[in-house]
Amino acid sequence: MNKEINPWSNQLVTDYDYLFEQFGLQRMNPTLVAKLGKHRLYRRGIVFAHRDLDKFVAAAEAGKKTGVITGIKPSSEFHLGSRMTAEQIIHLQQQFGTKVFYAIADIEAYADNGLGLEDSHNYAVDNVADLLALGLDPEKTFFYKQSQNMHVANLANIFARKTTLNMLEALYGHQNLSLYLAVLTQAGDIMAPQLEAFDGPKHMVVPVGIDQDPHIRFTRDLADKFKDEFGFITPAATFHKFFRALNGETKMSKRDPLGVMTLNDTPELLKKKLANTLTGGRSTAEEQRRLGAEPEKCVVFELMQYHFYEDDKDLKEMETDCRSGKLLCGECKGIRLKHIQEIFKKHQEKKKKMLPKAEKILEQPIGFKKKTN
């Protein structure tokens, strides 16, 4: 059983109750879920924990200033984990009319992946086009690159004044200095929307996967340390569960291209990937007809639960057919493949139209490039 929380690891966390006990996460209670609207990620418990989300919602309902901050490391195409975070910020934007602050973490892409700013720019344009196609309102969104936002850089340097190596090693283990600097920069991303340049202190929420909680704890601690100086309000956060890679062994990660579905995948590639996706099937067809399969072990079921079935009735029907043995896994994959391909087709058609707007939003970057031999 892995209990590690590491933003740079691809290991799964399997004991979520342990996280509540060890790190003081708050549970998503029914009253809070109801206030968030009828979105599958909340009602199905995929967004399963939070820190001070109730304070953010109360502020939004009272008409106070609020904001949502998130971002992406522009090192590859959007995969389903990226899409899951994007759906949350879009929903919060629509539900509460809150402004979104979206960071293009090109400094982290260089620190973690050695990706030069010019290369990360191309990924960033592609990523922003995905966001626009998914429904993000650019008129209520502030897009920026870490490499070009001096407010973020300045805060990172200010935060370093009250940060020690012991603090960073306790949260992240022993890492190279570039990753520690990326952590400080990410804290700057989260807190910059509360500067006077962005209309001052406000209730913010950061939707992330549970592997990002070290960043949240670190930043909340800094917000408290600098509250008197800047008037910061401690940021809230929501946490979604890990979505497994298609082989079922690790979390879905950009580091494993064959283990993820990206929003650019062709119908043929989707077919290939789904064919190799882990199921909860039995050893033989006869056994499965008799005993049924096990959807709790099946990544195909997880795909539909997390990402592709909006209607709970469709998900329940799939589960019933699975447990009863009515459908074998091959038949089931064929049905789900058609549904997934249709969703991707519609998204890619929208995205193609959004690429010029995404390019306009993100200016060509300046700065260092990755060295080549």
Image (cartoon, grey):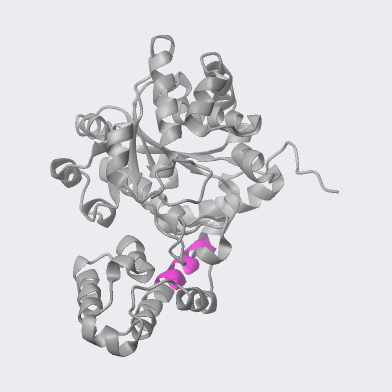
Specify whether residue 114 is in view: yes
Residue 36, image x, y percentages: 22, 45
Which of 190/126 is in front? 190
Residue 136, image x, y percentages: 41, 50
Residue 165, image x, y percentages: 57, 21
Q: Residue furthest bottom?
A: 286
> From the viewer's perspective, is residue 265 above or below residue 225?
below
Does the segment drawn in magenta span residue 347? Answer: yes
Which of 247/54 is in front? 247
> From the viewer's perspective, is residue 262 above or below residue 37?
below
Residue 213, image x, y percentages: 40, 36
Q: Which residues are magenta?
A: 343-353
Residue at image point 44% right, 55% down: 81
Does the segment drawn in magenta span residue 141? Answer: no
> From the viewer's perspective, is residue 273 above or below residue 183?
below
Q: Residue furthest left?
A: 31
Count the marks: how many?
Answer: 0
